[in-house]
Image (cartoon, rainbow, N blue to C red):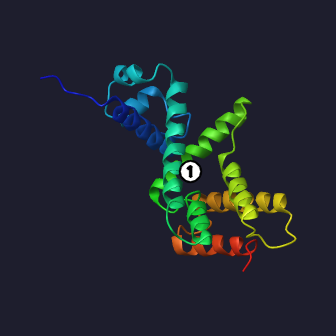
Amino acid sequence: MPKIVNHQERKASIAKATWNVIARDGLRGATVRSIAKEANLSLGAVRYYFNTHEELIVFAMELVEQQVNERIAQHLQKPLPIKQIIVAVLLELVPISEQHIIEMQVWLEFVSYKVRSGEPTEEHILSGIEKIFAYLQHENLLQDGLVVHDEIVHLHAFIDGLALHVLMGLVPMDKVRLQCLIEKEIDKVLKL
């Protein structure tokens, strides 16, 4: 009896192998051959699912975004106070686990690639922070007198910088401490 292959699972498996190669060897080291080896597949099997190297890399990056968005959506469904939800969402953007580190490395490599090639990059983190502030403003939960745009830029820079510093080892990957740092930033803008 022939082996039944779930094609979506196989594509995801190849994408995750791509993450591992990118995290270990960078985007330049993520050749189709090295990815096939990491996935324990033949070169032909990888090419069956992805016609080009670019298609594979884009799919791998989109899978990172999809997984992060799914985790964020789970936080948004929880019946918690808004501050706890916001902190939980923002923690998803900072490396707090080995999985988060791999996702962050892949994301940074991909963004660097886009910048070097002159392609426009979408800034989903900024968009998410803008949505958080829009909600807080709509619900009248922001402190009076804030310049909302400046606070959005500040929080975006803070989260990006914090994530990068954790990735570089300048800030320990301690979830409790990172949560505390994010809470301090949120407390600066929320009405008490």
Identify whether 55 is placed above or below 179. above
Is residue 190 shown left or right of residue 36? right
Residue furthest out toward the front: 139
Q: Nearer the viewer, residue 26 or 110?
A: 110
Q: Residue at x 56, y 50 (%)?
A: 104
Query: Which quadrant, please, contains the N terminus?
Result: top left
Is residue 173 shown left or right of residue 184? left
Q: Residue at x 70, y 59 (%)?
A: 135
Residue 74 image point, x, y percent? 48, 57
Q: Quadrant of residue 139?
A: bottom right
Residue marked by disc 1: 104
Please tell me how crowded label 1 is: few (under 14), some (14-19), or many (20+) other residues with Cα within 10 Å.
many
Is residue 42 shown left or right of residue 63? left
Residue 22 image point, x, y percent? 51, 40
Query: Which quadrant, please, contains the C terminus?
Result: bottom right
Q: Residue at x 57, y 75 (%)?
A: 177
Residue 161 image point, x, y percent? 69, 59
Q: Residue at x 45, y 23 (%)?
A: 50
Q: Secondary structure at mark 1?
A: helix
Q: Nearer the viewer, residue 112 or 175?
A: 175
Residue 99 image point, x, y percent? 46, 54
Amino acid type assigned to the residue bearing label 1 in the image = Met
Q: Quadrant of residue 46?
A: top left
Q: Nearer the viewer, residue 93 or 43?
A: 93
Q: How many marks are shown on the rendered structure? A: 1
Residue furthest out toward the left: 1
